[in-house]
Amino acid sequence: MKFGILVNEGPFTHQASDSAYQFTKAAIAKGHQVMRVFFYYDGVNNANRLSEPQADDRNLVKLWGELAKEHKIDLVVCIAAALRRGIKEEILAEGFRISGLGQLIEVGIAADRTVMFGD
C-alpha cells in the first residue's frame, strides 16, 4: 500500500510528530511505501535544523532526516506555514525541502491512503 503522511504538530509540543514517525517506520517495515511526508502548521518545526534537544531527549528532526535518507522518502515543508514560523530554506535540516500545498494534493491523489497526525 502507498501512504502519504500529513504532520500538523511540532516535535516538542504534541505527540503527533512522534506518532507519525513511528507509523512511518512501521509501515515501511511491513513492506508498504511512504511516498511523502508533508509538514503543515506547527509541523514545519520538525524541519528546523537549529533545534537542539537535550542529549537524553529524542531528536525528531534528525530522525526524520535519517529515515528519509535511508528509504528515499520525500519530506516536504509547506512554504506558507514555514515562513509564518520563520522557517526558511537556509535553516532546513537535511532531507527536507520547501514547497506548496500542491505537493499535499498530489500525494493525496497518488497514495492509497493519506494519514493525518495532529489537529
Image (cartoon, rainbow, N blue to C red):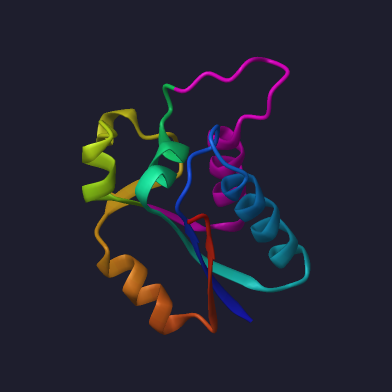
Counting from the top left corner in percent of width and height, residue 33 is at 61, 72
Residue sitting at x 53%, y 41%? 65
> In the image, is residue 79 part of the stretch drawn in magenta?
no
**Measured along the vertical axis of the image, is residue 110 above or below residue 52?**
below
* Stretch of the chain drawn in magenta: 51-76
Residue 4's spot in the image, x, y percent?
50, 70
Q: How many marks?
A: 0
Please name the residue shown 69% across and 23% down the image.
Answer: 57
Percent x, y for residue 115? 55, 69
Quadrant that contains the N terminus: bottom right
Where 90 falls versus 63 (above or below)?
above
**Residue farthest to the top, as pictured:** 55
Q: Say which quarter of the image contains residue 88.
A: top left
Q: Is residue 28 above or below residue 107?
A: above
The reply to whether the magenta stretch includes residue 55 is yes
Residue, far front: 119
Q: Nearer the viewer, residue 11 or 32?
A: 11
In this picture, residue 8 sits left or right of residue 2: left
Q: Residue at x 47, y 23 (%)?
A: 51
Residue 35 on image: x %, y % = 51, 68
Where 49 sits versus 99, above or below?
Answer: above
